[in-house]
Image (tube, rainbow, N blue to C red):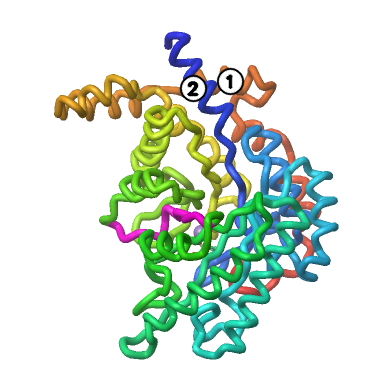
Amino acid sequence: MNSHRTDAIAGALDALRIELPSWGFANTGTRFGKFLQPAAAATIAEKFSDAGEVHRLTGACPTLALHVLWDFPDGVRSASAVRALAGQHGVRPGSINPNLFEEQHYKFGSFGNPDPAIRARALAHAADSVAIARELDSRDITLWFADGSNYPGTANIRQRKQWFEEGLRNVHTRLAPSQRMLVEYKPFEPAFYHTDIADWGMALLLARASGPQARVLVDTGHHYAAQNIEQIVAWLLAEGMLGGFHFNDRRYADDDLTLGSIDPYQVFRIFHEIQFFEWETGTRADIAYMIDQSHNLKGKIEAMIQTVMMAQELYAKAALVDHAALASAQAHCDLVAAESILQNAFATDVRPAIVEWREAHRLPANPMAAFRAGGYLERITGERQHRAAAASSYA
Ligand code: LRH
Ligand code: MN
C-alpha cells in the first residue's frame, strides 16, 4: 500500500474516538432470559475498570457513556466518586443518559405522560442528568424515550408531541453553553403501536424546536430493515443536525449486536457519507461516535474490543475513497466507476496499515489477542464470580 493511503488510514485512526457504554459491561438479557457472566461488571468501579482495559488495548476509547439510574445511585451526589474512578482508570465520563423508561410511574410515559405530575418527575430527572453532566464536564446529554402506546386510539399523538416540545425546550434551558442534548429516535419497542419519537424527522423537528444546542442521535439499530440509514445520515449532516451515533448491528430489529457482525458494508456506507461530507466542506463533522450494545451470549469485553476493531477497519476503508474521482464520476453519471470507487475501498485490506498505526502508538498489534493473553478476564472472574447474581432485567 502506498504511503498516501497509509497516511490516509493513520489520519483517520488518529481522529476516530469511540465512546463505550457502561451498560455494555453489565449482565443484560432479553425478556426471554439473561445468561449471567461471572466476570460481568456490576458496579460503576468495575465498569470503569473494564472500559479502561478496552482503552488500554485499543487507544481509541477515552470516554464512558453513563446511564443515570444504573451508574449514579445517589444522583448528582455520586458524581465525585465517578470523577475519582475516571482518574483511576484513565477513562473520562462521557455522555449522560437519563433513565426515563423503567420505573413504575413511567407506565404511560414520561415527557409524554397525560399526568402532569409524572411529566414533572421526568423533567426533574432530566434536569438532574444535566446537573450531573455539568458536574463531570460531560458535553452530551443523550435523551431516549420509551414513550408511546400499544393500541390505536389510546394516545393523543399531537398532544404528546406538544408535551415533548415543552419538556425538551425546558431541558435545553438548563444546558451550559458548551453542552449538547442529543435526541435519540426509535420506531418501536417497548411501545408497539406508536412511539412518540419514532424517526429521524420527528427527532430533527423536536431538536430544532428545543434550541441551538440540540442535535439528533442515530442508533443504527433503530430503523426499519428497508431504511437507508446513510441517506438519513447525509440529510442530518446537510442540516447540521447530526450529533452522534449509537453503533450496533442487527438482523431484524434493535438486536444490539456487535458492529459489522451482520452488515459491515452498511457501516462503511455511513462512514463514507461522513468523510465525503468532510472532504466536500473542508470541515470536521462534530459527531460523537458511541457504542450501544448488550451482549447476552458473547463476552462483554471481547464484544467491545471486536466492535472497536471493526469500527477502526471500516472507518479506515472509508478514508481510502478517492473523493475527487467519486465527485467526478457522480457528476458524469458514470455509475459503474462511482460504485467501484466505494467497492474498491471497501475491498482493500487495511489491517496491515492499522497494525502499523497501533505499533506506532505503542499499542498491541492485535487488541483481541492481547486481551486473551493478558489475564485481565481471569483476574476479574476470580474477583467477581462469588457475588450473588442480581435479578434485574437490564444493566
Ligand atoms: C434504547 C437505547 C437507548 C438506551 C438504551 C440502553 O433502545 O438504544 O439508547 O438508553 O438503549
Ligand atoms: Mn441507543
Could you say where residue 113 lies in the image, as x and y percent from the top left?
51, 85
Could you say where residue 164 lies in the image, as x and y percent from the top left?
49, 74
Q: Nearer the viewer, residue 119 or 210?
A: 210
Could you say where residue 246 lies in the image, as x and y percent from the top left?
50, 52
Q: Nearer the viewer, residue 212 or 202?
A: 212
Could you tell whether 152 is left or right of 98 in the image?
A: left
Mark 2 is surrounded, within 10 Å at the Cα level, by few (under 14), some (14 to 19) or many (20 or more) other residues, namely many
Q: Are marks 2 and 1 in contact (CB under 8 Å)?
A: yes
Could you say where residue 171 lies in the image, as x and y percent from the top left?
60, 68
Residue 25 in sight from this viewpoint: no
Image quadrant occupied by the N terminus: top left
Q: Specify the segment rendered in magenta.
A: 214-225
Could you tell whether 363 is left or right of 357 in the image?
A: right
Q: Nearer the viewer, mark 2 or mark 1?
A: 2
* Gap in angstroms between the C-alphas marked 2 and 1: 8 Å
Q: Secondary structure at mark 1?
A: helix
Residue under the point 80% across and 56% down: 82
